[in-house]
Amino acid sequence: MSIESNNWGRWGADDERGALNLIDAEKILSSLRLVEKGVIISLAQPTGPGHGAPPHRNPVSRFMDRDAGDYALGARAPGGFKFAEDSIALPTHSGTHIDALAHTWSGDALYNNFPASNIRSTKGAVRLGADKLGSIVTRGVLLDFVKLFGGPLKPSQEISAADLKQAYEDLGLSPQPGDAVLIRTGWWKTMGGEKEYFDLEPGITEEGALYLANCEASLVGSDNYAVEVQPDPDGKVFPVHLALMHQFGIPLVENLDLEELAQSNVNTFLFILLPLRLEGSTASPATPIALI
């Protein structure tokens, strides 16, 4: 397989879904046949106040609109009916979330050559926002490097293209177009909640990203915050983000919890992720699931 430079124009000049277009009806139907036990596994980390947001972003906040205290102070309860309601404020790039293709770019053009001026403070992402991702149902593939490397990955440990290729071979799997490729590093279990979780992540290299793009993955996710190794060994700034999202239109799913899935000893499964239709947002919180 030869690596193309990008997917711009591959699905037309107006395409805003990128590599998710690889998931066609045939892919969905074949993926449904992977379900044998009828077991649902959540792949989401907990999100809420004190969870999920890195130090450089606003924290997740909860505001109670109505609670038991209101009734203790005399709020009316017609017929004895009482209720509680709350509002949540959170960065879209906190907790388990999917990056929209508007999230990152280089130069003056977004993925598929849309002008970067399409991202505005007044309207958000006019193009390539989270509302353009659509529902995702496909074959999921777990590449478990905790098992393959004999333990949780160390701070800033790299996963190369050769490592990814070897992982497929060790599992007896072949990459298929439209796959959701999930990479377990053990970083969430090892460092979840610590400052280093966001700073010294093990993950894939730029070369590894290009390998997955060449395998025609529809999305790539990991149990860390950036998917890619941090800091970059070559001193680049988020080259995996630029390679996968900007060049190839492959969304990233960050902050996965892959522990229960790893314990199931299943490496291919039905993967479902339903982004919120957040118009103009650069990401969407999500609870992806694996059905085995």
Image (cartoon, grey):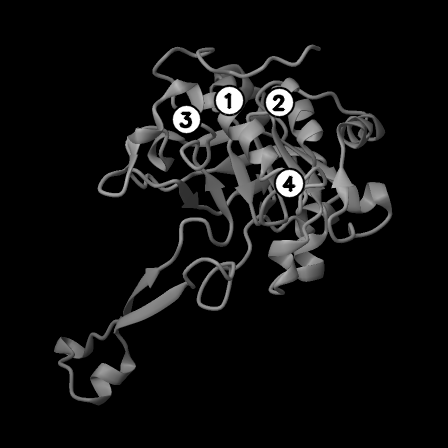
Residue on which the image places disc 2: 213
Q: Who comes first in sequence, dot 3 or dot 4?
A: 3
Residue contact at pointers 2 and 3, CB within 8 angstroms:
no
Residue 183 in percent (x, y) is at 68, 40
Residue contact at pointers 1 and 2, CB within 8 angstroms:
yes
Residue on which the image places disc 4: 228
Q: Mark 4 and mark 2: span between their CA atoms?
A: 14 Å
Q: Mark 4 and mark 1: span between their CA atoms?
A: 19 Å
Visible residue check, residue 236: yes
Which is more foreground, mark 4 or mark 2? 4
Residue nearest the viewer, comparing 196 with 70: 196
Q: Residue 199 carries which label?
A: none
Q: Who comes first in sequence, dot 2 or dot 3?
A: 3
Residue at 38% across / 57% down in the picture? Answer: 90
Q: Mark 2 and mark 3: span between their CA atoms?
A: 17 Å
Mark 3: few, some, or many residues within 10 Å (few <14, many ≥20)? many
Residue on which the image places disc 1: 19
Q: Which amino acid does label 3 sit on?
A: Leu
Residue at 27% across / 43% down in the picture? Answer: 121
With respect to residue 240, does 93 lie above or below? below
Q: Which amino acid does label 2 sit on?
A: Ala
Q: Who comes first in sequence, dot 1 or dot 2?
A: 1
**SS at badge 2:** helix
Which is more foreground, mark 3 or mark 4? 3
Residue at 40% across / 19% down in the picture? Answer: 113
Quarter of image, res 59: bottom left
**SS at badge 4:** loop
Residue 21 in percent (x, y) is at 47, 19
